[in-house]
Amino acid sequence: QRGAELLRAPVLSLIHQRGWQPHLTGGSQPMAAPKASVRLELVQLSSVLIRHAAPAVADLRKDIIKFGWMFIRNEDIMIKNASYVLVAQFIAAFDTPLKIILQAYSSLLKAHQVESRFLVRQALDILLPVLPVRLGQQASEPPAAGAAALPAWVLLAKRILVDNSASLAHTTHVYQLIAGHPAIFFPFRMHFASNLVGVLQKMCLTHSATSETRTLALDIMDLFLAWHEMLEGHGGGDANHNLVAASAEGDANRSSDEGVGERSTSGSSLAAPDLLLPESRRETIVGLLLRMLCLVFDFALKTNLGPRALDLLQRYLDSTKWQPMHLRLTFFERSIQQIEAQGMNQQLVLHILTVLSTVTSQMQPVWFEEYFGVLAAIIRKCIVVDNGQVQKIVASMLRQLYEQAAENERLGSSPAAGDLRSHVETLVNKNLQDGTNTFGTLLILHSIG
């Protein structure tokens, strides 16, 4: 490594004599330093040396780990967790006793102080990739009868989530760890799936939800799709392991979200049950995305998370990959009512129609027949908004409704379809006579042919 070439023996000897050794000669407590910032710099310097020049400091590794381990007992939370970063770097670079590895990993999983969470996450991100190598399949306790033994590092993470399920503050960094390392946790996905889905609503929709927790919620939704793609890449994966794990964790709770209805029986069926993303779990995620997008306008419009949530909604509804869902339009009706009461704000109307068009693009004819009247009512309220982007979406959705009515004789002859045609014709004639909203009128004429 280039760092090893740059570090000469006299330089390392100086750091060793003036930085590490003085803290090891005073017994169990580190020597007094002029400032806490000096201690912090020494710890961070040690981390940098191991990360960039591990071979150069290999002969000094015993003193380095003693130095780092001494500082993890420091009362200063920044020094303490910076020392865990140092210990994690050491474990990644050198063979380390299992007891030290497990103790460091367990302590990091339990560390939840907000002011130094970034250091905890940094240490875990360094440590986690080497745990399967350093610890292998060693279990921390005998498995239950009939259950597969989990590696100790997996079991420790799962236990933290279970024991602290009521406190998001104590588990956020663990969820971030799992979401940030999908490949590492992939073999153990079924042991975390229900817990991950169960915490999403707390992250997204409670009064304590923040930009950080909502970002994490989207990360977890993305994680499930990444795991699903990995599973497809494995040709369906280890089905037996999934069945055992799914049985052990219990059936996933069915969603009761008002924005998600019964499963559709139309469309092609899957060749085998999807234990990672069954319909109930996918419905829960889609329902949460719709609630965030349609009801939490600050999230959807004032952060960069809205477009990402919309992309996730598209991927979870993709009719080329999944069985179609039978979504109700409750959230959209409620949103339009709120927007209408506020004077039909153009930005909000455009946002809601963008989300709705994402949903309608993946729906089946039977769904359009059931919700034709609701869709027509929403369009009738939005068609008068004098905004070019709104009018483009309105015209596109009108085309969808007209096409569905043309292909379905019963729907085409229904009062809802007749009322929509009459309303559109009246509005078009009025606009042409008055010379108003010419762009939108031409779009409508083009869309309905």
Image (spheres, helix red, strand yellow):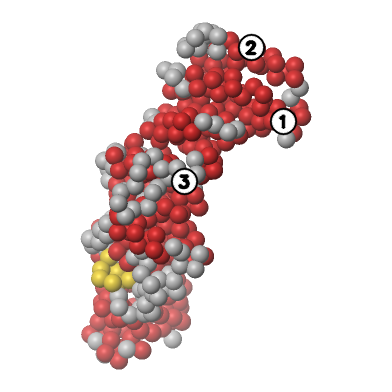
Please state the horizontal and vertical placement of residue 342, each as a whole percent of the image: 28, 55
Tell me: 190 left or right of 86.
Answer: left
Residue 298 versus residue 98: which sits nearer the camera? 98
Mark 1 falls on what kind of element?
Answer: helix
* Real-space Cα separation, disc 1 to disc 2, in angstroms: 20 Å
- Residue for point 39% across, 39% down: 140
Looking at the image, tell me whether mark 1 or mark 3 is earlier in sequence order: 1
Q: Quadrant of the N terminus?
A: top right
* Real-space Cα separation, disc 1 to disc 3, in angstroms: 34 Å
Looking at the image, tell me whether mark 3 or mark 2 is earlier in sequence order: 2
Q: Amino acid type of disc 1?
A: Gly
Please state the horizontal and vertical placement of residue 229, each as a whole percent of the image: 48, 63
Q: Is residue 272 above or below residue 144?
A: below
Q: Which residue is mark 1?
A: 3
Tell me: 137 left or right of 7.
Answer: left
Q: Which residue is mark 3?
A: 137
For disc 3, the neighbor class at 10 Å (few under 14, some 14 to 19, many from 20) is some
Q: Say the numbered circle drawn on residue 18.
A: 2
Residue 381 occupies quadrant: bottom left
Mark 1 vs mark 3, foreground winner is 3
